[in-house]
Each structure stands twice: as C-alpha cells, then as structure tokens.
Image (tube, rainbow, N blue to C red):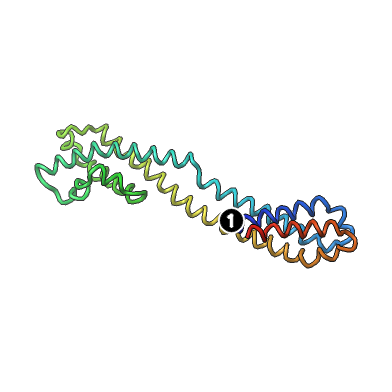
Amino acid sequence: MDDKSQNYRIMAQGVLALLTRTRSEWEARYAKLLPDYEALGQALAEVDVYAQARSSTDTAGYTNAKDAAETAALNAAVVVLNGLRALQLDAPRPALAKVAAYSPSALSKLRDQAQADALTEIGTLAAPLATELAAELVTAAQLTTQRDTAAAFAALVGVARTQTVEGASARRQALDHLANARAAIERLDVRLPNLRPTLPELVAQYEQQRRVVAAGS
C-alpha cells in the first residue's frame, strides 16, 4: 500500500473511531448513517486482514534462510565443479561444457531461479559420473550434499516467487476494500453535515478528521 493509500486508511480509521465513540448520540437522531458506518467498519477490517497478509510475505527470517541456503549450495557446488572441470581435461564432453565453464564467482553472480537452475543442473550431470569423479577425489557424500543443498536453495527460491504473487494479490485485495471504505465515507460526507444543528461538535470533529487525508495526499 503506497503512502497516499496509507494516509487515507489512517483518516478512515479516525472517522470510524469518532463515529464509534459517538454512536449513541448520532444513531438515535439519524439512523440512516448506520449502513454506511457499518460498511466502513467492515471495509477497514478487511483492509487490515489483507495488509497483514502482505506484510507476512516479506520477513527477515525468510531472507536469512535463503542467504544461508545459497551459501551452502555454492560451497557444495564448488567441489563438484572442480571435479567436472578435471574430467574435461582428459576427455572434453559437450554435455559438460556449460557447467564446467562456470567459475565459482560466475556461479555466485547468478540470481534466484537462474542460480537455482544452474546448481540443479550441476548435480544432475554429475550423478551418473560418480565413479569417474571419485578418481578426481570427489566423494559420493559430496555429490549427495551438492544435490541436497541445491534442492534446498531451489525450494526457497520457489517460496520467493510464491510470496511475490501472494503479496501482489494481498495488495490488490487491500486496495479493493479501501475503495469500499472510500465509498462509505463519501456517503457519510453527504449526510453528516445534516447533524450540524443538533450535534455541531460531532460534525466539526468529523470535518477535522476528514482534513487529515488532504494533508497526507
């Protein structure tokens, strides 16, 4: 939610709080305000739900886990890469040319899905060459570690893609409900001034709260 939408949300929450505090005063005099008051409360409750859902898709804990998984996968891949490059010295194989050409620094510069794909490909190509790689001092345990760490990193990259989609969806939902809140307030704007003769202080407070968004916009 951008700053302008957030400012409007704050203003709308203030309007709702004001009308909730004074409900016993205005409801008895002007029951026609009630549907829009209730619509405003429902819309803002939904905005909160989706705003919280969007917030939960971007956490420091996820970032730290992804960084750790990337480091482990790269460290494990270097060992296998060295073995594959050594095999290429004796008998160059076209199928290995792409991965054997990776330097550790080039592999580390790849990002997210491209990096995950490269790490997975290394493990896939190395698996059937376990015997030959053993002669280059790459153990079966190291091959397994490389595949496992590549898979763990790829899984977290997948989570990032899901989070991006979910975060965008939650933002759209929050903005849709904020539009509902806006519609309710626009209707309240028409009716609230009718209370000025009997509840002038309430109307003044309402108008003051409505001006909050003008400053924020």
Q: Report the quarter where the C terminus lies.
A: bottom right
Q: Quadrant of residue 64?
A: top left
Q: Quadrant of residue 8?
A: bottom right
* Residue at x 38% of width, y 39% of height: 69
Residue sitting at the far front: 215
Q: Is residue 99 above or below residue 187?
A: above
* Residue at x 35% of width, y 42% of height: 151
Q: Where is residue 51 drawn, in percent x and y?
A: 60, 51
Q: Which residue is mark 1?
A: 3
Q: Is residue 148 visible?
A: no
Q: Where is residue 31 drawn, in percent x and y?
A: 85, 61
* Residue at x 51% of width, y 53% of height: 166
Q: Number of marks in the image?
A: 1
Tag 1's secondary structure? helix
Packing grade of label 1 (10 A; few <14, some 14-19, many >=20) is few
Q: Is residue 15 above or below residue 109?
A: below
Q: Report the quarter where the N terminus lies.
A: bottom right
Question: In this image, 50 relative to 113: left or right?
Answer: right
Question: In this image, 168 relative to 205: left or right?
Answer: left
Residue sitting at the far left: 90
Q: Is residue 94 visible?
A: yes
Q: Where is residue 117 drawn, in percent x and y?
A: 31, 49
Question: In this image, 156 relative to 139: left or right?
Answer: right
Q: Is residue 110 above or below residue 132?
A: below
* Residue at x 20% of width, y 39% of height: 82
Q: Nearer the viewer, residue 148 or 76?
A: 76
Q: Where is residue 23 drawn, in percent x and y?
A: 83, 53
Q: Nearer the viewer, residue 114 or 93?
A: 114
Q: Nearer the viewer, residue 174 or 4?
A: 4
Q: Quadrant of residue 205?
A: bottom right
Tell me which amino acid carries mark 1: Asp
